[in-house]
Image: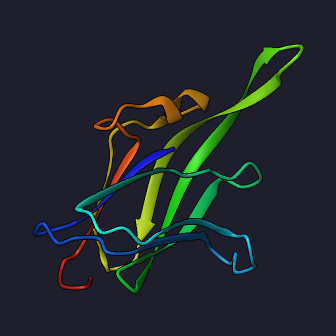
Amino acid sequence: MATSFTVNDLKHIKALVIKGVDRNDVGDTLVNDQDSTLTKRYNLPLSLLADSTGFVLEVNGKKDTLFIRHTMILSFISEDCGFAPDYVISGLRHTTGIDSVIITDTKVNPKSIEKTTNDQNISIYFSSAAH
C-alpha cells in the first residue's frame, strides 16, 4: 500500500519510525527514517491473516496509531507464481495526533508499489501542534 506522510503547516518530519501494532521484536521495524523532509512516502504491507492492519507511527518522537480495515481477495497469477493478494480498503481509525487520513485509492494490489510520487493509496496528515 503506497502511503504518504505529511505534518500540517509545512513542518518538517525529522524522524519517522513505523512498526506494526504489538510488533516490538528486533527486526519488526518497517521504516526507520531519520532524514528531515516535508513529506515522506513508503509502501506498507497489509495483513494476510486479518481484516485489519495496525501501525504505530512515531513522528518526531510522538507516537500515534493507525488501523486500516480491508478485505482481501486472492487472485490467481499463474501456475508458476501461484496467488497474490488484492485488497480493498474499507475504513480506518486513528489516534488524535493524526489530523486526517485521505484514502485516494481503495484498491491495493501488487502493482500498488509502482505508483508514481504523487499517487498513493492513502495520505496521512499529522497535527503540527502534536508533532
Q: Quadrant of residue 86?
A: top right
Residue 1: x %, y % from top left: 51, 44
Please give left or right for residue 87 compared with residue 75 in the image: left
> Which residue appears farthest toward the top when viewing the image?
78
Q: Is residue 51 above or below residue 19?
A: above
User: In the figure, 93 relative to 85: above or below?
Assistant: below
Q: How many marks?
A: 0
Residue 17 x %, y %: 49, 73
Judging depth in this view, the residue of 116 and 47 nearest the camera is 116
In depth, the one of 53 and 58 nearer the eye is 58
The quadrant where residue 50 appears: bottom right
Residue at screen point 77% across, 18% down: 76
The C terminus lies in quadrant:
bottom left
Residue 127: x %, y % from top left: 22, 75
Residue located 26% across and 63% down the image: 37
Horizontal arrangement in the rendering, residue 103 relative to residue 100 (left or right): right
The image shows residue 3, relative to residue 92, as above or below, that is above
Seen as rendered, the residue at the extreme front is 35
- Which color mode does the image show? rainbow
- Position in image of residue 12 (x %, y %): 22, 70
Q: Residue drawn at (58%, 31%), measured in percent from left and top?
A: 109
Residue 60 in the image: above or below residue 111: below
Q: Is residue 127 left or right of residue 86?
A: left
Q: Which of 28 and 53 lies nearest the eye of the viewer?
A: 28
20 with respect to 104 (left or right)? right
Residue at the right extreme of this rendering: 79
